[in-house]
């Protein structure tokens, strides 16, 4: 018996070692950190039920933005650092829906109905650019995203919106920096079929919506087009040789990614309760990229599983570390931790030799 | 040799205006934008000249620090932010020790250089691991380093290392305040010799420092190491076959860049007289890169002339755009957003053009 246990132990430790090697040092550090935070939360007697509820909400709220990374990563364009393009499209859609006076579920659906095609169209145009700069998508995308945010800031400051809920109360031109959704579609998904278990608020509608989006994307990635995209991402020469139109699938990737980004920000906003305009979308892409990489993705290989796990881990870390950091050290620290983790994991992914993903 | 003989011949055929315009399209476009902006901003000329002189003195050094990595084929070094951080750490130390004037500034420089060398070395090693992706690595590295910097300034200082200076630390005793007063070293370099013409003050010694840097840079590029930078920049394989230690040359290029950026940040801060603890360094990389690109440099080619012209144009735009935006659109914010858009947009377009040309060459 004892021997058997020891052997099992050996097997287990070896398996653990293999898992550790597969995960890489930065992810191990992140997991250890998360573990420490959870233990600290218990020791400090923080309200675990509220924290769990927050994790669930933020998981559903950020999930679709993270899913938006999958199409471009799978098709070999790397993470979509140009995501702010899709996000601003989503914001335009939401502001239009408010301008037209839609409220409640109608407001949410109208926003989505405008956001998805608008984001897709912008993503298509963006894809045309990216096809010209193959190999430099990440750098060009980063600065393209930044430029779009500043350009759209000019738009927000000048656009002729009329709704008194969105323009500055004392007149003048331009939209407010944050627009409250209280009378529109604030928490429309979060409150749908929401229930409370052991003090944990479960945002059922939000989670259902996110999982539905995951399922649809999963189906798509398994369709003929999805498999072709993966083929292009795995080996561009091979894809060309079997007659796939590489540029077309790359266009499809950026279109889908920006459309998801546009829809994602609306889901994010309904949960958050506010639309954040101007400079707010500037760094959102980085957090989405960081999330999916924490979930185990590499620069050119990402699956739904990576997105789901990564979002969950990353958001748990943020939710738990915020009160812990506030109690133990200082308030700004959780934001700092967020920056370090996000960019640290991206740096790690960049510095890894991509032989593994090439072989796939 | 044959090639060398050919180039002047090809450039000779009279004075080719069309080609001149085409080759310098970016600076010419920005000269026009700046001229229009200055016109609509309606600023008095002496004020404009005074502002530009100040900004040229305090920013040129940072922009020039980008040249060596470009020549070494590593693209635009967004990692100069780390150099700026090294300078700020040094300032935090010298202000804490209550150093003053030129002596204090010298001590800051002496402290900065070793720190910047270490930062540059680490950056260079990382870039060697991410060969071909140096620029995106540099961008992400600058964000990552900014996170660590904030961790150190918010928590390590005062929280781990005792830092008994009430004027620098937050009331809780942990973490630095948002701004640190550099009054004791304000204008320490600028005011050694200052020529005044009415509103316009010329910080002679700062310009001398920039001039020395330019001469030193030209000299460096003529040495063996300078030739190695060029060789590695042109073709890594051939440079390797020729017996150049590529990895080391690339690291050295980044070390030079980081140290120069650190010195540049010291010049910048002594002129400003105030250190925004969590903000002074953040945009250093973006603004320097935008400036050198506006001057007509590309991802693979840059000269000192382009760096200086770019600094001039970029900062002219910086001064005039809020007022021009206010006078044209009735909203000063629009001008503000416009100049940020120009900074980001110019970088985006330059990177896109570089990748585009690189692809059509293949």
Image (cartoon, helix red, strand yellow):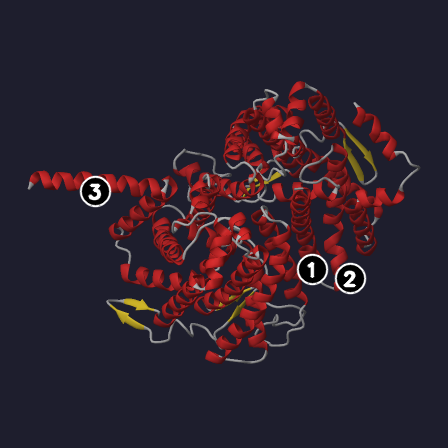
Residue B328: numbered disc: 2
Q: CA distance from mark 1 to mark 2?
A: 9 Å
Percent coordinates x, y for residue B127 in the rendering? 53, 35
| Left or right of B4 on screen, residue B140 | left
Quickly name the residue at label 3: A12
B302 over B324 or under it: above or below? above
- The reply to whether dot 1 and dot 2 touch (C-beta < 8 Å) is yes
Q: Residues within 10 Å of mark 1 (few under 14, many from 20)?
A: many
Who is closer to the viewer here, B14 or B302?
B14
Same chain assignment for discs 3 and 2: no
What chain is tagged by disc 1? B
Helix, strand or loop under label 2: helix
Mark 3 to mark 2 CA distance (whole Å): 70 Å
* Residue in the picture at 59% in, 40% down: B78
The residue at the far right in this view is B14
Residue B281 drawn at (x, y percent): 58, 41
**Tag count in the figure?**
3
- Mark 1, residue position: B334
The chain carrying label 3 is A
């Amino acid at each position: 018996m004892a021997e058997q246990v020891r052997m099992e132990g050996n097997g287990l430790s070896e398996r653990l070692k293999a898992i550790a090697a597969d995960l890489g040092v930065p992810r191990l550090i992140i997991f250890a950190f998360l573990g420490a935070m959870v233990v600290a939360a218990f020791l400090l007697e923080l309200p675990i039920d509220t924290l769990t509820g927050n994790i669930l909400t933020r998981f559903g709220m950020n999930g679709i933005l993270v899913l938006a990374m999958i199409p471009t990563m799978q098709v070999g364009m790397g993470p979509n650092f140009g995501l702010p393009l899709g996000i601003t499209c989503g914001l335009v859609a939401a502001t239009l829906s408010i301008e037209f006076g839609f409220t409640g579920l109608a407001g949410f659906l109208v926003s989505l109905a405008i956001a998805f095609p608008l984001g897709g169209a912008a993503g298509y145009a963006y894809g045309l650019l990216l096809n010209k700069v193959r190999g430099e998508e990440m750098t060009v995308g980063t600065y393209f995203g930044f430029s779009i945010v500043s350009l759209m800031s000019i738009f927000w400051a000048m656009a002729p919106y009329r709704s008194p809920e969105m323009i500055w109360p004392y007149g003048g031109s331009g939209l407010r920096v944050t627009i409250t959704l209280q009378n529109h579609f604030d928490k429309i998904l979060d409150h749908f079929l929401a229930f409370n278990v052991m003090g944990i608020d479960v945002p059922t509608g939000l989670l259902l919506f996110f999982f539905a989006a995951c399922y649809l994307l999963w189906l798509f990635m398994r369709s003929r087009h999805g498999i072709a995209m993966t083929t292009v991402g795995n080996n561009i020469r091979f894809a060309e040789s079997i007659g796939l139109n590489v540029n077309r699938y790359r266009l499809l990737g950026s279109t889908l990614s920006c459309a998801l980004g546009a829809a994602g920000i609306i889901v994010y906003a309904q949960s958050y309760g506010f639309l954040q305009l101007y400079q707010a979308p500037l760094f959102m892409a980085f957090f989405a990229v960081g999330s999916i990489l924490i979930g185990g993705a590499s620069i050119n290989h990402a699956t739904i599983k990576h997105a789901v796990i990564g979002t969950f881990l990353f958001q748990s870390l943020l939710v738990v570390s915020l009160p812990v950091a506030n109690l133990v050290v200082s308030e700004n620290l959780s934001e700092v931790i967020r920056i370090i983790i996000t960019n640290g994991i991206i740096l790690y992914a960049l510095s890894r030799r991509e032989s593994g993903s090439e072989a796939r | 040799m044959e090639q060398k003989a050919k180039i002047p011949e090809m450039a000779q055929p009279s004075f080719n205006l069309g080609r001149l315009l085409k080759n310098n399209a970016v600076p010419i476009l920005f000269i026009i934008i700046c001229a229009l902006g200055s016109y609509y901003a309606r600023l008095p000329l002496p004020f404009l000249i005074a502002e530009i002189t100040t900004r040229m003195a305090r920013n040129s050094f940072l922009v020039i620090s980008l040249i060596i990595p470009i020549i070494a084929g590593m693209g635009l070094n967004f990692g100069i932010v780390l150099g700026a951080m090294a300078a700020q750490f040094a300032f935090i130390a010298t202000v804490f020790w209550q150093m003053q004037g030129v002596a204090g500034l010298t001590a800051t420089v002496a402290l900065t250089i070793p720190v910047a060398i270490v930062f540059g070395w680490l950056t260079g090693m990382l870039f060697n691991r991410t060969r071909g992706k140096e620029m995106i690595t540099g961008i992400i590295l600058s964000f990552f380093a900014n996170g660590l910097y904030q961790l150190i300034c918010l928590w390590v200082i005062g929280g781990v290392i005792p830092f008994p200076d009430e004027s620098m630390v937050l009331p809780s005793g942990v973490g630095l305040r948002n701004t640190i007063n550099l009054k004791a070293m304000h204008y320490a370099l600028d005011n050694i010799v200052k020529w005044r013409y009415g509103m316009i003050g010329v910080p002679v010694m700062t310009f001398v420092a920039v001039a020395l840097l330019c001469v030193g840079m030209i000299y460096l590029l003529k040495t063996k190491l300078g030739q190695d930078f060029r060789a590695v920049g042109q073709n890594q394989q051939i440079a390797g076959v020729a017996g150049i230690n590529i990895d080391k040359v690339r690291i050295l290029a980044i070390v030079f860049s980081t140290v120069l950026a650190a010195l540049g940040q010291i010049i910048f801060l002594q002129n400003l007289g105030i250190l925004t603890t969590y903000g002074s360094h953040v945009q250093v990389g973006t603004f320097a890169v935008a400036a050198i690109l506006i001057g007509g440099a590309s991802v693979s080619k840059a000269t000192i002339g382009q760096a200086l012209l770019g600094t001039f144009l970029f900062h002219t735009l910086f001064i005039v755009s809020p007022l021009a935006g206010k006078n044209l659109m009735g909203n000063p914010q629009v001008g503000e957003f416009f100049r940020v858009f120009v900074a980001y947009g110019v970088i985006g377009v330059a990177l896109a053009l570089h990748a585009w040309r690189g692809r059509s060459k293949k």
